[in-house]
Image (tube, grey):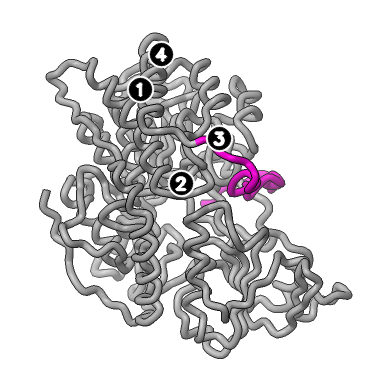
Amino acid sequence: MTIEYPVEQKVPKAFPKNKGPPPNIEWPVATVDQVIQKTLKEAAEAKEDPFIFDKPIKRVAVIGAGAAGLPTAKSLKEHGIEVRIFERMEDVGGIWLYSEETDEKPRIPCDTYRTRQKPLDEEEKIVEATPEERLKKLKHAPPSACYPDLHNNTAAPLMMNYEDFPWPEGTSWYLPYHDIQTYFKNYANHFGLYDHMELSTSVEYVQRNDNNDDHLWTLTLRKSEYINDRTMIRYKTWTESFDAVAVASGAYNDPFLPNFSNLSEYNVNYPERIIHSKQYRHYQDYIGKNVLIVGGNISAIEIAQRLDGIADNVYMSMRGPFVSISNILNLARSGLSDNIIRKPNIRAFSDFQGQVNGSITFEDDTMVDSIDRVIFCTGYVNDLGFLGPLRAYGTSAEEAEEQETQGPLVITNGMRPVNTYRDIFAIRDPTLAFVGTPGHLTSVQFFYYQAQAVARVWAGLACLPSRPKMRHFVKTNMYPFPPFDMNLLGCILFSQQFVTWLNEHAKQQDRKKNVNVLKGVDPSLVELWDELKEQYKKRTTEILAKRSTIVPTKSYNHKL
Protein backbone atom coordinates (compact mmCIF):
# COMPACT_ATOMS: atom_id res chain seq x y z
CA MET A 1 0.00 0.00 0.00
CA THR A 2 1.43 3.40 -0.93
CA ILE A 3 1.16 6.84 0.58
CA GLU A 4 0.23 9.65 -1.79
CA TYR A 5 2.28 12.84 -1.87
CA PRO A 6 1.47 16.22 -3.43
CA VAL A 7 3.81 18.15 -5.68
CA GLU A 8 6.99 18.83 -3.77
CA GLN A 9 7.12 22.31 -2.27
CA LYS A 10 10.10 24.53 -1.53
CA VAL A 11 11.42 24.95 1.97
CA PRO A 12 11.47 28.71 2.78
CA LYS A 13 14.71 30.56 2.17
CA ALA A 14 14.84 31.38 5.88
CA PHE A 15 15.62 27.73 6.63
CA PRO A 16 17.85 26.80 8.25
CA LYS A 17 17.31 29.70 10.62
CA ASN A 18 20.12 31.85 11.94
CA LYS A 19 21.62 30.81 15.25
CA GLY A 20 21.08 34.26 16.76
CA PRO A 21 21.36 38.00 16.28
CA PRO A 22 24.53 39.71 15.08
CA PRO A 23 27.29 39.87 17.71
CA ASN A 24 26.76 43.61 18.28
CA ILE A 25 23.23 43.06 19.64
CA GLU A 26 23.04 42.77 23.41
CA TRP A 27 20.38 40.43 24.74
CA PRO A 28 18.99 41.37 28.18
CA VAL A 29 19.39 38.66 30.80
CA ALA A 30 16.84 38.37 33.60
CA THR A 31 17.41 37.27 37.17
CA VAL A 32 15.67 34.24 38.62
CA ASP A 33 13.49 36.54 40.74
CA GLN A 34 12.47 38.59 37.70
CA VAL A 35 11.49 35.40 35.87
CA ILE A 36 9.43 34.25 38.84
CA GLN A 37 7.56 37.55 39.17
CA LYS A 38 6.78 37.78 35.46
CA THR A 39 5.60 34.16 35.35
CA LEU A 40 3.40 34.59 38.42
CA LYS A 41 1.64 37.46 36.66
CA GLU A 42 1.12 35.35 33.54
CA ALA A 43 -0.14 32.42 35.64
CA ALA A 44 -2.69 34.68 37.34
CA GLU A 45 -3.91 36.01 33.99
CA ALA A 46 -4.29 32.45 32.69
CA LYS A 47 -6.50 31.59 35.69
CA GLU A 48 -8.63 34.68 35.11
CA ASP A 49 -9.11 34.05 31.39
CA PRO A 50 -8.33 30.37 30.71
CA PHE A 51 -8.56 28.28 27.60
CA ILE A 52 -11.43 25.80 28.05
CA PHE A 53 -11.08 22.35 26.50
CA ASP A 54 -14.24 20.97 24.91
CA LYS A 55 -14.09 17.81 27.00
CA PRO A 56 -11.79 16.04 29.47
CA ILE A 57 -8.64 14.44 28.08
CA LYS A 58 -8.51 10.83 29.16
CA ARG A 59 -6.49 9.02 26.48
CA VAL A 60 -3.28 10.32 24.90
CA ALA A 61 -0.85 9.12 22.23
CA VAL A 62 2.84 9.91 22.70
CA ILE A 63 4.87 9.73 19.49
CA GLY A 64 8.45 8.81 20.35
CA ALA A 65 10.24 7.12 23.27
CA GLY A 66 13.41 9.16 23.41
CA ALA A 67 14.57 11.83 25.84
CA ALA A 68 11.36 13.86 25.36
CA GLY A 69 8.78 11.11 24.91
CA LEU A 70 9.64 9.10 28.03
CA PRO A 71 9.07 11.87 30.61
CA THR A 72 5.94 12.92 28.72
CA ALA A 73 4.46 9.44 29.01
CA LYS A 74 5.51 9.12 32.64
CA SER A 75 4.00 12.50 33.54
CA LEU A 76 0.71 11.69 31.82
CA LYS A 77 0.56 8.34 33.56
CA GLU A 78 1.23 9.79 37.01
CA HIS A 79 -1.58 12.31 36.55
CA GLY A 80 -4.15 9.65 35.75
CA ILE A 81 -4.27 9.81 31.96
CA GLU A 82 -4.25 6.63 29.86
CA VAL A 83 -1.20 6.72 27.62
CA ARG A 84 0.01 4.81 24.57
CA ILE A 85 3.60 5.27 23.38
CA PHE A 86 4.61 4.60 19.78
CA GLU A 87 8.31 4.27 18.94
CA ARG A 88 9.68 3.47 15.48
CA MET A 89 12.94 2.02 16.77
CA GLU A 90 13.37 -1.33 18.48
CA ASP A 91 14.02 0.23 21.89
CA VAL A 92 13.95 3.50 23.79
CA GLY A 93 16.66 6.15 23.75
CA GLY A 94 16.21 7.97 20.46
CA ILE A 95 19.50 9.35 19.17
CA TRP A 96 21.45 7.32 21.77
CA LEU A 97 20.32 3.96 20.35
CA TYR A 98 23.25 2.73 18.26
CA SER A 99 22.98 0.77 15.03
CA GLU A 100 25.86 -0.43 12.90
CA GLU A 101 23.64 0.24 9.92
CA THR A 102 23.50 3.78 8.61
CA ASP A 103 20.76 5.98 7.23
CA GLU A 104 20.31 6.45 3.50
CA LYS A 105 22.00 9.46 1.93
CA PRO A 106 19.66 12.47 1.89
CA ARG A 107 18.15 13.69 -1.33
CA ILE A 108 20.36 16.20 -3.14
CA PRO A 109 19.22 18.91 -3.22
CA CYS A 110 16.95 18.58 -0.20
CA ASP A 111 15.30 21.99 -0.40
CA THR A 112 11.86 20.45 -0.77
CA TYR A 113 9.50 18.56 1.53
CA ARG A 114 6.69 16.08 1.10
CA THR A 115 3.40 15.87 2.94
CA ARG A 116 1.51 12.61 3.37
CA GLN A 117 -2.01 13.05 2.13
CA LYS A 118 -3.89 10.01 3.36
CA PRO A 119 -3.33 7.08 5.71
CA LEU A 120 -2.51 3.54 4.75
CA ASP A 121 -5.43 1.17 4.62
CA GLU A 122 -5.77 -1.13 7.61
CA GLU A 123 -4.41 -4.57 6.81
CA GLU A 124 -2.45 -7.52 8.13
CA LYS A 125 -0.32 -9.81 6.03
CA ILE A 126 2.15 -12.59 6.76
CA VAL A 127 5.04 -13.34 4.41
CA GLU A 128 7.91 -15.80 4.52
CA ALA A 129 11.18 -14.35 5.74
CA THR A 130 14.18 -14.78 3.48
CA PRO A 131 17.39 -16.25 4.97
CA GLU A 132 18.91 -12.75 4.90
CA GLU A 133 15.93 -11.21 6.67
CA ARG A 134 16.07 -13.78 9.46
CA LEU A 135 19.48 -12.41 10.45
CA LYS A 136 18.33 -8.79 10.59
CA LYS A 137 16.29 -6.63 12.90
CA LEU A 138 13.02 -5.38 11.50
CA LYS A 139 13.04 -1.61 11.54
CA HIS A 140 10.57 1.16 10.85
CA ALA A 141 13.04 3.91 11.66
CA PRO A 142 16.23 5.00 9.95
CA PRO A 143 19.27 4.49 12.19
CA SER A 144 20.23 7.39 14.44
CA ALA A 145 23.39 9.49 14.16
CA CYS A 146 25.02 7.61 17.05
CA TYR A 147 28.56 6.32 16.36
CA PRO A 148 30.77 3.99 18.44
CA ASP A 149 32.82 6.62 20.28
CA LEU A 150 30.02 9.13 20.78
CA HIS A 151 29.89 10.67 24.27
CA ASN A 152 27.61 13.27 25.78
CA ASN A 153 28.95 16.82 25.75
CA THR A 154 27.14 18.09 28.85
CA ALA A 155 27.66 16.92 32.42
CA ALA A 156 25.33 13.90 32.62
CA PRO A 157 24.54 13.83 36.37
CA LEU A 158 24.01 17.61 36.41
CA MET A 159 22.31 18.38 33.10
CA MET A 160 21.10 15.12 31.55
CA ASN A 161 18.89 13.94 34.37
CA TYR A 162 15.16 13.99 35.02
CA GLU A 163 14.14 15.57 38.30
CA ASP A 164 12.47 12.35 39.44
CA PHE A 165 15.32 10.04 38.36
CA PRO A 166 18.81 11.13 39.43
CA TRP A 167 21.95 9.43 38.24
CA PRO A 168 23.72 7.26 40.82
CA GLU A 169 26.11 9.09 43.10
CA GLY A 170 29.60 9.25 41.68
CA THR A 171 28.52 9.04 38.02
CA SER A 172 31.12 10.48 35.66
CA TRP A 173 30.19 13.67 33.89
CA TYR A 174 30.90 12.31 30.41
CA LEU A 175 29.76 8.88 29.34
CA PRO A 176 29.73 6.69 26.21
CA TYR A 177 26.49 6.42 24.28
CA HIS A 178 25.51 3.01 25.71
CA ASP A 179 25.46 4.34 29.28
CA ILE A 180 23.20 7.21 28.23
CA GLN A 181 20.84 4.80 26.47
CA THR A 182 20.86 2.58 29.56
CA TYR A 183 19.69 5.55 31.63
CA PHE A 184 16.62 5.89 29.42
CA LYS A 185 15.97 2.12 29.54
CA ASN A 186 16.16 2.20 33.31
CA TYR A 187 13.76 5.14 33.40
CA ALA A 188 11.25 3.29 31.22
CA ASN A 189 11.54 0.15 33.33
CA HIS A 190 11.34 1.93 36.67
CA PHE A 191 8.11 3.75 35.79
CA GLY A 192 6.51 0.85 33.92
CA LEU A 193 6.47 2.59 30.56
CA TYR A 194 7.20 -0.51 28.48
CA ASP A 195 3.73 -1.76 29.45
CA HIS A 196 2.26 1.18 27.52
CA MET A 197 4.63 1.05 24.57
CA GLU A 198 4.54 -0.28 21.01
CA LEU A 199 8.12 -0.62 19.76
CA SER A 200 9.08 -0.99 16.08
CA THR A 201 5.86 0.85 15.32
CA SER A 202 5.73 3.86 13.04
CA VAL A 203 3.07 6.54 13.15
CA GLU A 204 2.18 6.80 9.49
CA TYR A 205 -0.55 9.41 9.69
CA VAL A 206 -2.21 11.67 12.26
CA GLN A 207 -5.76 12.67 11.49
CA ARG A 208 -8.00 15.19 13.27
CA ASN A 209 -11.61 14.07 13.54
CA ASP A 210 -13.62 17.27 13.77
CA ASN A 211 -16.95 15.45 13.69
CA ASN A 212 -16.08 12.61 16.05
CA ASP A 213 -17.83 12.77 19.42
CA ASP A 214 -15.66 10.02 20.93
CA HIS A 215 -12.04 10.95 20.16
CA LEU A 216 -10.60 13.95 18.37
CA TRP A 217 -7.50 12.24 16.95
CA THR A 218 -6.89 9.03 14.99
CA LEU A 219 -3.42 7.59 14.34
CA THR A 220 -2.63 5.15 11.57
CA LEU A 221 0.07 2.78 12.85
CA ARG A 222 2.28 0.19 11.18
CA LYS A 223 4.31 -2.58 12.78
CA SER A 224 6.36 -5.54 11.61
CA GLU A 225 7.45 -8.51 13.71
CA TYR A 226 8.89 -11.99 13.33
CA ILE A 227 6.70 -15.01 14.11
CA ASN A 228 7.13 -18.79 13.95
CA ASP A 229 10.78 -18.81 15.04
CA ARG A 230 11.64 -15.94 12.68
CA THR A 231 10.57 -17.89 9.62
CA MET A 232 7.67 -15.53 8.90
CA ILE A 233 7.13 -11.78 9.10
CA ARG A 234 3.80 -10.25 10.08
CA TYR A 235 3.02 -6.75 8.84
CA LYS A 236 0.15 -5.05 10.56
CA THR A 237 -1.50 -1.68 9.91
CA TRP A 238 -4.21 -0.41 12.23
CA THR A 239 -5.72 2.73 13.73
CA GLU A 240 -6.21 3.94 17.28
CA SER A 241 -8.07 7.02 18.51
CA PHE A 242 -7.17 9.50 21.25
CA ASP A 243 -8.29 12.67 22.96
CA ALA A 244 -4.89 14.31 22.49
CA VAL A 245 -1.50 13.74 20.84
CA ALA A 246 1.97 14.60 22.19
CA VAL A 247 4.60 14.71 19.44
CA ALA A 248 8.02 13.85 20.90
CA SER A 249 9.60 12.40 17.78
CA GLY A 250 12.82 14.41 18.02
CA ALA A 251 14.48 17.00 15.85
CA TYR A 252 17.30 14.85 14.44
CA ASN A 253 15.57 12.50 12.01
CA ASP A 254 15.70 14.02 8.52
CA PRO A 255 19.19 15.17 7.45
CA PHE A 256 19.50 18.53 5.69
CA LEU A 257 22.05 19.43 3.01
CA PRO A 258 22.25 23.03 1.70
CA ASN A 259 21.90 23.36 -2.04
CA PHE A 260 25.34 24.65 -2.98
CA SER A 261 26.07 25.56 -6.57
CA ASN A 262 26.88 22.46 -8.69
CA LEU A 263 26.27 20.12 -5.74
CA SER A 264 23.75 18.02 -7.67
CA GLU A 265 26.15 17.52 -10.57
CA TYR A 266 29.02 16.75 -8.19
CA ASN A 267 26.89 14.09 -6.49
CA VAL A 268 26.06 12.51 -9.84
CA ASN A 269 29.72 12.37 -10.83
CA TYR A 270 31.04 11.32 -7.40
CA PRO A 271 28.16 9.69 -5.50
CA GLU A 272 30.43 7.79 -3.13
CA ARG A 273 32.07 10.94 -1.79
CA ILE A 274 29.14 12.64 -0.04
CA ILE A 275 27.52 11.67 3.25
CA HIS A 276 25.66 13.44 6.04
CA SER A 277 27.01 13.29 9.59
CA LYS A 278 24.08 11.02 10.44
CA GLN A 279 25.79 8.36 8.30
CA TYR A 280 29.20 8.69 9.96
CA ARG A 281 30.29 5.63 11.98
CA HIS A 282 33.98 4.59 12.01
CA TYR A 283 37.09 6.76 11.84
CA GLN A 284 38.95 3.83 10.23
CA ASP A 285 36.98 4.43 7.02
CA TYR A 286 38.89 7.70 6.55
CA ILE A 287 42.46 6.53 7.01
CA GLY A 288 44.64 8.15 4.34
CA LYS A 289 41.75 10.24 2.95
CA ASN A 290 41.38 13.96 2.37
CA VAL A 291 38.14 14.91 4.12
CA LEU A 292 36.08 18.07 3.88
CA ILE A 293 33.68 18.68 6.77
CA VAL A 294 30.91 21.16 5.99
CA GLY A 295 29.69 22.97 9.10
CA GLY A 296 31.15 24.36 12.28
CA ASN A 297 28.86 23.28 15.08
CA ILE A 298 29.13 20.41 17.57
CA SER A 299 28.79 17.44 15.21
CA ALA A 300 31.29 18.96 12.78
CA ILE A 301 33.76 19.69 15.57
CA GLU A 302 33.58 16.23 17.10
CA ILE A 303 33.95 14.39 13.79
CA ALA A 304 36.87 16.65 12.83
CA GLN A 305 38.56 15.80 16.14
CA ARG A 306 38.12 12.08 15.58
CA LEU A 307 39.62 12.26 12.07
CA ASP A 308 42.51 14.50 13.10
CA GLY A 309 45.69 12.44 12.70
CA ILE A 310 43.74 9.66 10.95
CA ALA A 311 42.86 11.29 7.62
CA ASP A 312 45.68 12.77 5.56
CA ASN A 313 44.03 16.20 5.67
CA VAL A 314 40.88 17.45 7.39
CA TYR A 315 39.30 20.62 6.03
CA MET A 316 36.45 22.40 7.82
CA SER A 317 34.25 24.81 5.89
CA MET A 318 31.87 27.02 7.84
CA ARG A 319 29.77 30.12 7.41
CA GLY A 320 30.66 33.19 9.43
CA PRO A 321 33.57 33.82 11.77
CA PHE A 322 35.32 31.10 13.75
CA VAL A 323 34.71 32.99 17.01
CA SER A 324 31.01 32.61 17.76
CA ILE A 325 28.50 34.59 19.83
CA SER A 326 27.90 31.31 21.71
CA ASN A 327 30.27 30.63 24.62
CA ILE A 328 29.49 26.91 24.47
CA LEU A 329 30.34 26.78 20.78
CA ASN A 330 33.57 28.71 21.36
CA LEU A 331 34.54 26.20 24.05
CA ALA A 332 33.95 23.31 21.63
CA ARG A 333 35.84 24.99 18.79
CA SER A 334 38.77 25.70 21.07
CA GLY A 335 39.38 21.94 21.13
CA LEU A 336 40.19 21.82 17.41
CA SER A 337 43.86 21.33 16.71
CA ASP A 338 45.89 23.49 14.36
CA ASN A 339 46.01 20.53 11.98
CA ILE A 340 42.40 21.19 10.97
CA ILE A 341 42.49 23.36 7.84
CA ARG A 342 39.84 26.07 8.20
CA LYS A 343 37.99 27.19 5.09
CA PRO A 344 35.18 29.71 4.59
CA ASN A 345 31.80 28.85 3.12
CA ILE A 346 31.70 26.86 -0.12
CA ARG A 347 31.07 28.84 -3.29
CA ALA A 348 30.63 25.90 -5.65
CA PHE A 349 31.32 22.19 -6.12
CA SER A 350 33.30 23.00 -9.26
CA ASP A 351 36.53 24.66 -10.32
CA PHE A 352 36.96 28.37 -11.07
CA GLN A 353 35.59 27.84 -14.58
CA GLY A 354 32.49 26.03 -13.33
CA GLN A 355 33.67 22.59 -14.41
CA VAL A 356 32.48 19.75 -12.17
CA ASN A 357 35.70 17.76 -12.05
CA GLY A 358 36.06 17.02 -8.33
CA SER A 359 37.31 20.48 -7.38
CA ILE A 360 35.61 22.58 -4.71
CA THR A 361 35.92 26.36 -4.57
CA PHE A 362 35.46 28.56 -1.52
CA GLU A 363 34.37 32.13 -0.94
CA ASP A 364 37.96 33.27 -0.35
CA ASP A 365 38.78 32.41 -3.99
CA THR A 366 40.70 29.28 -3.08
CA MET A 367 40.15 25.80 -4.48
CA VAL A 368 40.82 22.24 -3.31
CA ASP A 369 40.87 19.48 -5.91
CA SER A 370 41.88 16.41 -3.89
CA ILE A 371 38.91 15.74 -1.63
CA ASP A 372 38.05 12.05 -1.16
CA ARG A 373 35.09 12.46 1.22
CA VAL A 374 32.66 15.28 2.04
CA ILE A 375 30.79 15.03 5.35
CA PHE A 376 27.88 17.44 5.67
CA CYS A 377 27.35 18.40 9.33
CA THR A 378 24.57 20.79 8.39
CA GLY A 379 21.72 19.82 10.66
CA TYR A 380 18.26 18.41 10.15
CA VAL A 381 14.78 19.21 8.96
CA ASN A 382 12.07 18.47 11.51
CA ASP A 383 9.64 17.35 8.82
CA LEU A 384 6.59 16.16 10.83
CA GLY A 385 5.35 14.50 7.66
CA PHE A 386 2.92 12.27 9.56
CA LEU A 387 0.78 15.35 10.27
CA GLY A 388 -0.13 15.39 6.59
CA PRO A 389 -2.02 18.50 5.46
CA LEU A 390 -2.33 19.60 9.09
CA ARG A 391 1.13 21.18 8.77
CA ALA A 392 2.85 23.48 6.34
CA TYR A 393 6.09 25.44 6.17
CA GLY A 394 6.31 29.06 7.29
CA THR A 395 8.89 31.26 8.93
CA SER A 396 7.18 33.21 11.69
CA ALA A 397 4.35 33.28 14.21
CA GLU A 398 2.87 36.26 12.36
CA GLU A 399 2.63 34.21 9.19
CA ALA A 400 1.06 31.44 11.22
CA GLU A 401 -1.54 33.77 12.69
CA GLU A 402 -2.74 34.64 9.21
CA GLN A 403 -3.81 31.02 8.94
CA GLU A 404 -5.17 30.66 12.48
CA THR A 405 -8.75 30.21 11.36
CA GLN A 406 -8.15 28.21 8.20
CA GLY A 407 -5.54 26.14 6.45
CA PRO A 408 -2.89 24.03 8.23
CA LEU A 409 -3.09 23.60 11.99
CA VAL A 410 0.69 23.72 12.46
CA ILE A 411 3.21 26.04 10.82
CA THR A 412 6.80 24.84 11.04
CA ASN A 413 9.97 26.70 10.06
CA GLY A 414 11.66 23.39 9.26
CA MET A 415 13.05 23.01 12.76
CA ARG A 416 10.04 23.46 15.05
CA PRO A 417 6.40 24.58 15.02
CA VAL A 418 6.22 28.37 15.36
CA ASN A 419 2.55 28.84 16.24
CA THR A 420 2.74 27.21 19.66
CA TYR A 421 2.32 28.51 23.20
CA ARG A 422 5.58 28.16 25.13
CA ASP A 423 6.97 26.06 22.25
CA ILE A 424 4.53 23.27 23.18
CA PHE A 425 0.79 23.70 22.64
CA ALA A 426 -0.70 24.26 19.18
CA ILE A 427 -2.63 27.49 19.68
CA ARG A 428 -5.45 26.59 17.34
CA ASP A 429 -5.93 23.27 19.12
CA PRO A 430 -3.99 22.65 22.36
CA THR A 431 -4.92 18.95 22.30
CA LEU A 432 -1.86 18.74 20.03
CA ALA A 433 1.45 19.35 21.79
CA PHE A 434 5.15 19.18 20.95
CA VAL A 435 7.84 18.18 23.44
CA GLY A 436 11.56 18.33 22.74
CA THR A 437 11.76 21.04 20.06
CA PRO A 438 12.09 24.39 21.85
CA GLY A 439 13.38 27.42 20.00
CA HIS A 440 16.44 27.92 22.16
CA LEU A 441 18.14 24.82 23.60
CA THR A 442 17.63 21.11 23.88
CA SER A 443 18.30 19.65 27.28
CA VAL A 444 17.09 16.47 28.94
CA GLN A 445 16.33 18.42 32.11
CA PHE A 446 14.19 20.90 30.23
CA PHE A 447 12.20 18.17 28.46
CA TYR A 448 11.02 16.99 31.87
CA TYR A 449 9.39 20.35 32.60
CA GLN A 450 7.83 20.53 29.14
CA ALA A 451 6.42 17.04 29.79
CA GLN A 452 5.00 18.12 33.14
CA ALA A 453 3.32 21.09 31.47
CA VAL A 454 1.63 18.84 28.91
CA ALA A 455 0.42 16.36 31.52
CA ARG A 456 -0.78 18.91 34.04
CA VAL A 457 -2.63 21.04 31.51
CA TRP A 458 -4.37 18.03 29.99
CA ALA A 459 -5.16 16.64 33.45
CA GLY A 460 -6.74 19.93 34.51
CA LEU A 461 -4.02 20.72 37.06
CA ALA A 462 -2.77 23.82 35.23
CA CYS A 463 -4.39 26.35 32.92
CA LEU A 464 -3.47 27.70 29.55
CA PRO A 465 -4.45 31.31 28.84
CA SER A 466 -7.19 31.98 26.31
CA ARG A 467 -6.32 31.81 22.61
CA PRO A 468 -6.00 35.60 22.22
CA LYS A 469 -3.63 35.70 25.18
CA MET A 470 -1.61 32.77 23.82
CA ARG A 471 -1.24 34.58 20.50
CA HIS A 472 -0.23 37.78 22.30
CA PHE A 473 2.36 35.80 24.29
CA VAL A 474 3.93 34.44 21.10
CA LYS A 475 4.12 37.95 19.61
CA THR A 476 5.57 39.71 22.64
CA ASN A 477 7.47 37.09 24.64
CA MET A 478 11.22 37.43 24.84
CA TYR A 479 13.50 34.76 26.20
CA PRO A 480 15.03 35.80 29.55
CA PHE A 481 18.47 34.80 28.24
CA PRO A 482 20.31 34.77 24.90
CA PRO A 483 18.57 31.88 23.06
CA PHE A 484 21.55 31.45 20.74
CA ASP A 485 23.88 30.57 23.64
CA MET A 486 23.14 27.08 24.96
CA ASN A 487 24.39 27.74 28.46
CA LEU A 488 23.58 26.78 32.03
CA LEU A 489 21.85 30.06 32.78
CA GLY A 490 19.41 29.45 29.95
CA CYS A 491 18.48 26.03 31.37
CA ILE A 492 17.94 27.54 34.81
CA LEU A 493 15.84 30.54 33.75
CA PHE A 494 13.67 28.80 31.20
CA SER A 495 12.88 25.84 33.41
CA GLN A 496 12.01 28.30 36.16
CA GLN A 497 9.21 29.69 34.00
CA PHE A 498 7.58 26.26 33.83
CA VAL A 499 8.22 25.46 37.50
CA THR A 500 6.69 28.75 38.67
CA TRP A 501 3.62 28.44 36.44
CA LEU A 502 2.89 24.80 37.23
CA ASN A 503 3.57 25.04 40.96
CA GLU A 504 1.40 28.16 41.28
CA HIS A 505 -1.57 26.50 39.60
CA ALA A 506 -1.04 23.30 41.58
CA LYS A 507 -1.43 25.25 44.84
CA GLN A 508 -5.03 25.98 43.93
CA GLN A 509 -5.97 22.35 43.35
CA ASP A 510 -7.75 20.00 45.71
CA ARG A 511 -5.07 18.78 48.12
CA LYS A 512 -6.35 15.24 47.67
CA LYS A 513 -4.78 15.25 44.20
CA ASN A 514 -1.31 15.38 45.81
CA VAL A 515 0.49 17.22 43.02
CA ASN A 516 4.27 17.19 43.46
CA VAL A 517 6.09 20.50 43.85
CA LEU A 518 8.61 20.87 41.02
CA LYS A 519 12.13 21.94 41.95
CA GLY A 520 13.60 23.26 38.71
CA VAL A 521 17.23 23.34 37.65
CA ASP A 522 19.58 24.16 40.52
CA PRO A 523 20.64 27.84 40.15
CA SER A 524 24.03 27.06 41.66
CA LEU A 525 24.97 25.21 38.46
CA VAL A 526 25.76 28.53 36.81
CA GLU A 527 28.76 28.79 39.14
CA LEU A 528 30.25 25.62 37.61
CA TRP A 529 31.15 27.20 34.28
CA ASP A 530 34.90 27.29 34.89
CA GLU A 531 34.91 23.69 36.12
CA LEU A 532 32.79 22.60 33.17
CA LYS A 533 35.30 24.15 30.77
CA GLU A 534 38.18 22.24 32.31
CA GLN A 535 36.25 18.96 32.46
CA TYR A 536 35.15 19.36 28.84
CA LYS A 537 38.74 19.72 27.68
CA LYS A 538 39.77 16.62 29.63
CA ARG A 539 36.81 14.72 28.18
CA THR A 540 37.87 15.51 24.63
CA THR A 541 41.46 14.47 25.28
CA GLU A 542 40.38 11.16 26.82
CA ILE A 543 37.94 10.34 24.01
CA LEU A 544 40.54 10.98 21.34
CA ALA A 545 43.07 8.87 23.18
CA LYS A 546 40.68 5.92 23.23
CA ARG A 547 38.94 6.61 19.93
CA SER A 548 36.53 3.76 19.17
CA THR A 549 38.05 1.24 21.60
CA ILE A 550 35.61 2.30 24.33
CA VAL A 551 33.46 -0.52 25.68
CA PRO A 552 30.77 -0.58 28.39
CA THR A 553 32.37 -0.58 31.81
CA LYS A 554 29.49 -0.63 34.27
CA SER A 555 25.77 -1.11 34.58
CA TYR A 556 23.82 1.63 36.30
CA ASN A 557 21.33 0.60 38.95
CA HIS A 558 19.13 3.49 39.93
CA LYS A 559 17.95 3.75 43.50
CA LEU A 560 15.45 6.47 44.27
Amino acid at circle 3: Val
**Where is 386 relative to 327, above or below?**
above
Residue at 86% across / 72% down in the picture? 354
Q: What amino acid type is highlighted by mark number 4?
A: Glu
Q: Nearer the viewer, mark 2 or mark 3?
A: 2
Residue lying furthest top in this view? 48
Q: Give the spatial CA distance, label 2 vs label 3.
A: 15 Å
Secondary element at image label 1: loop
Q: Please name which of the two marks, 4 or 3, marks the residue nearer to the observer.
A: 4
Residue found farthest to the bottom:
288
Tell me which numbered mark, 1 or 3, is placed earlier along the sequence: 1
The range drawn in magenta is 1-28
Q: Which percent across, then down, holds residue 111?
A: 68, 53
- Please name whichever residue, 226 or 367, is drawn nearer the observer in this view of the structure: 367
Residue 316: x %, y % from top left: 62, 72
Indicate which disc residue 418 carries. Answer: 3
Marks 4 and 3 close (CB-CB < 8 Å): no
Q: Which residue is mark 2?
A: 441
Separation (CA) of disc 4 from disc 2:
27 Å
Q: Does residue 549 appear left or right of residue 275 in this picture?
A: left
Mark 4 secondary-structure assignment: helix
Q: Main secondary structure of the magenta part?
A: loop
Q: Residue at x 17, y 16 (%)?
A: 510
Mark 1 vs mark 2, foreground winner is 2
Residue 120 visible? The answer is: yes
Query: In the rendered structure, which disc, 2 or 3, sits on the residue that comes first in sequence?
Result: 3
The residue identified by callout 1 is 214
**Can you give x and y, in whole percent of width and height, for residue 125 in the image?**
38, 55
The answer for how far apart the CA atoms under marks 1 and 2 are is: 37 Å
The mark nearer the N terminus, 4 or 2, is: 4
Are the residues flagged by discs 2 and 3 in contact, CB closer than 8 Å? no
